[in-house]
Amino acid sequence: MDTLTTTIKREFLDEIVAGRKRVEYREIKPYWTDKLATVRPPFQLRLINGMSATAPEATVEICRVTKNNAEGCYELHISKVLDVKNLAGNRTRPKGEFDRAYFFLWNPAEDTESFRGLEGIMKKAQAGKPYTRRWRCPSKQPGPGDTAYLQRTGPTNNGVFARGIVASEPYIDEYGDRVVKLELDEFLPIGLEISRDKIRAAARFEGHWDPYASGNIIPPSLLSAIERLWQTRRA
């Protein structure tokens, strides 16, 4: 699929990733007329907020281009967000509004490659370099820009210990597994993980919540409890 690249203001990038902005506008000028003549929908549009190598960005699929002569602009209609990068920890969110958040699981006994050298990974995250990893996700629901919380399972240090964003649509990998890309930029110190029991107690949650696979959406009351507990452990 052909790809065009352009810059974008951060507020508009966040709106696109959140799914609230479905059309991107560009002025009818020779520059964009020539660029659009080189592609046919569907094509990819890479939107970058800045010039640095770590600038926030998103790649979207453009399904249709219309020419609005009255407004003097091309209307690039977005069908879906394909990928996001460098958005973890920097997204804006209206006050009081929670993102969709999903629960992911890591069993160190079965997956010994992920988080190898965890202390180094945590230091890099603190320095602004998120840990990016492909993660098995049976669910089709998580999408780019959604919040991701990761729980370590097993007998030692069991609990939520990392968070960031989902950075891709779910897709089938070369092994036939459905996966997503996670971009994790925040970690709790070892020993301060948040157990499920503490989450349920903080939320006063009386229903059944015991996810056994990655990609389950977190109910709002539990998400609120996780975020409160997370902040107390970071303080």
Image (spheres, helix red, strand yellow):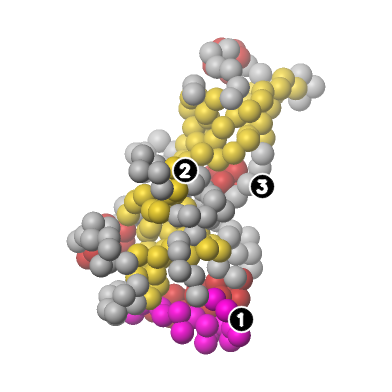
Residue drawn at x 50%, y 75% as measured from the top left: 210
Dot 2 crowding, Cα within 10 Å, few <14, some 14–19, many 20+: some
Residue drawn at x 66%, y 42% as measured from the top left: 21
Which region is colored magenta?
Answer: 192-209
Is residue 144 inside the magenta stretch? no
Instruction: Name the foreground residue: 159 vs 231.
Output: 159
The image quadrant of residue 206 is bottom right
Picture layout, residue 46 above or below residue 157: above
Picture layout, residue 30 above or below residue 198: above
Residue 208 visible (yes or no): yes
Is residue 197 inside the magenta stretch? yes
The residue identified by callout 2 is: 171
The residue identified by callout 1 is: 207
In-image side of 155 versus 23 (left or right):
left
Task: Check disc 1 and report its element: helix, strand or loop.
Answer: loop
Residue 20 on image: x %, y %: 66, 47
Q: Quadrant of the C terminus?
A: bottom left
Residue drawn at x 44%, y 38% as measured from the top left: 50
In-image side of 141 versus 153 (left or right):
right
Instruction: Name the foreground residue: 54 vs 22.
Output: 22
Among the two numbered marks 2 and 3 on one chain, the one whose residue lies closer to the N terminus: 3
Q: CA distance from mark 2 to mark 1?
A: 31 Å
